[in-house]
Amino acid sequence: MGTDAARALADAGGLLVTGFGPFPGVADNPSGRFAASVDGARVDGVAVVGRVIPVEWSRAWPAVRAAVEALRPAALLMYGVAVQRQRVEVERLARNVAGRRLDAAGALPPHARLVPDGPAALPTTLPWRDLVGPAVGVSDDAGDYLCNAVTFHAMHALGERLRFCGFVHIPPSPTPGVRAVLVRLAGVMARASV
Ligand code: PCA
């Protein structure tokens, strides 16, 4: 997306949407495809920028942080796929753990804890009650892989700077719930800014 849309995001209370790229077992990640598809969109008057994040222990959180620093969005909505899930679920918690699981570059996490002196868990600041609906539920277990990791880091480092910050797991098959979360969050942001 062009610099004009990025400027609009910084100036107009915009929304950064992230998804992930491929990782072992998932060659084509629907969360990254969704984030790319909404890049440059306006939803309910809210400017949206979409970014695809590498599924790598050393690069995922730095990529999210760099995008937030460059774009200065009002809110950060992150998506990732969970292959066993049947429906879209807003994650209410992220935990300070990194599972010993290989990433897309074949690397393991450097430590068992994401932030050595950080809390055991952090709650989302997404207005999750407003986001749930027929195709969207909630979860209190974001796993111990990269989705949980970027979410914990983002909430730990940016939770107070962003109006809303959180993560949504989506199933591998297409469902209207994926877009519904974005539309509902944009609606909350639009109503709050009038
Ligand atoms: N899902 C993985 C990481 C990237 C993704 O899309 C997860 O649930 O942690």
Image (cartoon, rainbow, N blue to C red):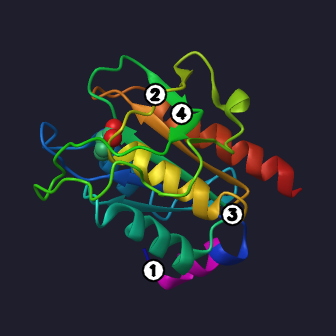
Determine whether label 4 and label 3 are within 8 Å by CB.
no
Q: Residue at x 35, y 46 (%)?
A: 98
Element type at mark 1: loop
Mark 4: amino acid: Glu
Where residue 34 sits in the image (x, y, percent)? Answer: 37, 47
Name the dominant secondary structure of the magenta segment: helix
Q: Quickly name the residue at label 4.
A: 91
Q: Which residues are magenta?
A: 2-9
* Residue that carries the numbered disc 1 in the rendered image: 2
Q: CA distance from mark 2 to mark 3?
A: 24 Å
Left or right: where 148 falls relative to 154: left
Instruction: Check the image and name the residue furthest to the front.
Output: 117
**What kind of residue is marked 3?**
Ala
> Which quadrant of the rendered structure holds the C terminus?
bottom right
Residue hosting label 2? 176
Mark 2 or mark 4, which is nearer to you?
4
Q: Residue at x 25, y 53 (%)?
A: 21
* In magenta stretch: residue 29: no
Nearest to the observer: residue 170 or residue 7: 170
Residue neighbourhood size for the residue with mark 2, other residues' Cα within 10 Å, grouped as few (<14), some (14–19), many (≥20): few
Q: Tag 3 or tag 2, which sits nearer the N-term?
A: 3
Residue annotated with mark 3: 74
